[in-house]
Amino acid sequence: MGAATSASTLDAQLAMQGTRVDLRPTLRGIRIPTLVISGIRDAICPPEFHHEIVAEMPNARLANVDGGHLLPLERANVIGEAIRAWHTSEPWLTNAPRRT
């Protein structure tokens, strides 16, 4: 996927990264159950980043997956299983009304 991206597009993406705002200080205010999924071989957002996120969120849980940065593409079935397991273990989610 990256090999098909032009140099000018990569340059633009890198420039946009410099405009990001650090929202980590706001994580403590997120009180809803949250699943954070981390690729253990993610070189772009390493697992340490996800540990930091989970440590700041009172109702967060971490799922580590053997994969890299694009887990939904790399390990779709494993991601689905992790979400299902988390969803069924959270009473707040399990008892929520279902949309039809």
Image (spheres, rainbow, N blue to C red):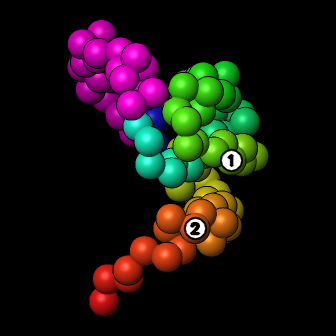
Residue at 55%, 43% in the rendered image: 59
Q: Secondary structure at mark 2?
A: helix
Say the numbered circle drawn on residue 20.
Answer: none
Which amino acid, by three-letter code, is at mark 2? Pro
- Residues at marks 1 and 2, CA–CA distance in whole angstroms: 18 Å
- Residue 42 falls left or right of residue 1: right
Please identify the quadrant where the C terminus is shown. Answer: bottom left
Q: Is residue 43 visible?
A: no
Residue 33 included in the magenta stretch of the image: no
Task: Identify the residue position indicated by label 1 in the image.
Answer: 63
Q: Mark 2: few, some, or many residues within 10 Å (few <14, many ≥20)?
A: few
- Residue 8 falls left or right of residue 1: left
Rendering quarter of residue 49: top right
Which amino acid, by three-letter code, is at mark 1? Ala
Residue 88 position, x and y percent, is 62, 71
Q: Main secondary structure of the magenta part?
A: helix
Residue 23 included in the magenta stretch of the image: yes
Say the numbered circle drawn on residue 91.
Answer: 2
Rendering quarter of residue 86: bottom right
Near-viewer residue (55 or 36)? 55
Count of residue discs: 2
Question: Which span of residues is magenta-colored?
Answer: 3-29
Residue at 44%, 42% in the rendered image: 31
Residue 96 position, x and y percent, is 43, 74
Near-viewer residue (52 or 59)? 59
Residue 45 position, x and y percent, is 56, 26
Q: Mark 1: few, some, or many residues within 10 Å (few <14, many ≥20)?
A: some
Q: Secondary structure at mark 1?
A: strand
